[in-house]
Image: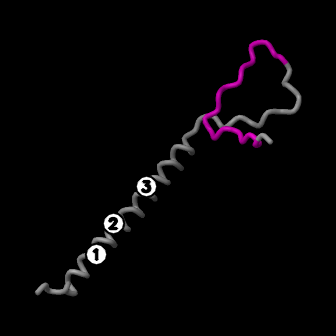
Amino acid sequence: MQRPLTRRAYLVVFAIVVAILAGTGFYLRYRAAKAAEAAANCDTPAPPPKPVAPPPKLPGFELEAGCGTPPVTPPKR
């Protein structure tokens, strides 16, 4: 005859589940903080959206590539 799980076994399983959930929460907060830190350390902001009229051609003028999120392109229909 098998012994049913005791209260202590349920407590151990519950403690393991709580520890896993707490570890997952800490990891997700750490990952979000790292992403925010990487975005805050961006030297060059994202370029503005493309203007309707093309910019004038100036000799020796070049745009530096931005490190922010790429501009949103409207979906093609």
**Of the residues shown, which amino acid type is indicated by label 2?**
Ile
**Of the residues shown, which amino acid type is indicated by label 3?**
Tyr
Instruction: State the residue in front, 60 or 6.
Output: 6
- Position of 17 compared to 39: left or right? left
Q: Which quadrant: the C terminus?
A: top right
**Of the residues shown, which amino acid type is indicated by label 1?**
Ala
Q: Secondary structure at mark 1?
A: helix
Q: Which residue is mark 3?
A: 30
Q: Which residue is mark 1?
A: 15
Q: Secondary structure at mark 2?
A: helix
Foreground mark, 3 or 2, reads: 2
Q: x, y percentage for residue 18? A: 34, 72
Q: Are marks 3 and 2 in contact (CB under 8 Å)?
A: no
Q: Is residue 32 above or below residue 10?
A: above
Instruction: State the residue in front, 13 or 19.
Output: 13
Visual colour scheme = one colour
Q: Is residue 66 magenta?
A: yes
